Amino acid sequence: MATRLKYFVFYTIGHWANEVNVAPTIAEIKSAYLSEYSPAEDFIAAVQEFLVNPITESAIMKESVSNYGLMPKMRLQLAQSNAIASYLIQTQVEIDSCFSDEYPKEQARV
């Protein structure tokens, strides 16, 4: 029963996500930050800053904020925001197959 429920939830979310955009893709976010912040340290610092305190004034994707709204503020610790930013710069999220290739590897490590 639990397996069928998991399948339904993932199928439904995947189906819904393909029809309705609620935010820019992670690849678009990475590309925007890379175009503004070229050294990895600056990229990580900028992503961290926005994750910890997302405000319109510091958003580099103004059109996305206009289209989708500002992301909610999350209660991330510095180590968590650093891990997210580091993962983003180190992972080839701009490749369509990234999720299907990398997700099973990440799950195997858990």
Image (cartoon, helix red, strand yellow):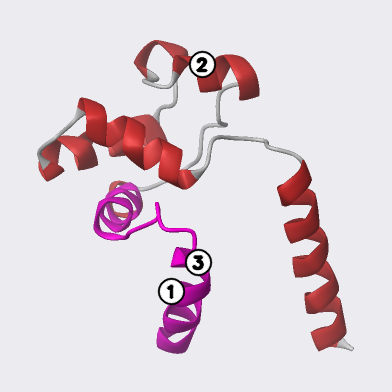
Q: Which secondary structure dominates the residues rendered in magenta? A: helix
From the viewer's side, name the closer residue of 19 and 46: 19
- Residue 44 at x, y percent in the picture: 22, 42
Q: The residue tagged with tag 3: helix, strand or loop?
A: helix
Q: Earlier in the sequence, mark 2 or mark 1?
A: 2
How far is disc 2 from disc 1 in space, using C-alphas? 30 Å
Residue type at tag 2: Glu
- Residue 30 at x, y percent in the picture: 35, 41
Q: Residue furthest top?
A: 57
Q: In the picture shown, does residue 99 fall above or below 31?
A: below
**Residue position marked by numbered label 3 in the rendering:** 99
**Residue position marked by numbered label 1 in the rendering:** 102
* Proximity of marks 1 and 3: CB atoms separated by less than 8 Å: yes
Residue type at tag 1: Glu
Q: The residue tagged with tag 2: helix, strand or loop?
A: helix
Residue at the spot 50% in from the left edge and 66% down from the top edge: 99
* Mark 1 crowdedness (10 Å alpha carbons): few <14, some 14-19, many ≥20: few
How far is disc 3 from disc 2 in space, using C-alphas? 26 Å
Q: Residue furthest right?
A: 1
Whether residue 12 is visible, yes or no, is yes
Q: In the picture shown, does residue 5 fall above or below 56?
A: below
**Residue position marked by numbered label 2 in the rendering:** 63
Horizontal side of residue 11 vs 53, given as left or right: right
- Residue 73 at x, y percent in the picture: 52, 32
Q: Which disc is residue 110 wearing?
A: none
The span picked out in magenta is 81-110
Residue type at tag 3: Phe
* Mark 3 crowdedness (10 Å alpha carbons): few <14, some 14-19, many ≥20: some
How far is disc 1 from disc 3 in space, using C-alphas? 5 Å
Horizontal side of residue 98 vs 24, given as left or right: left
Q: In the picture shown, does residue 89 fall above or below 65?
A: below
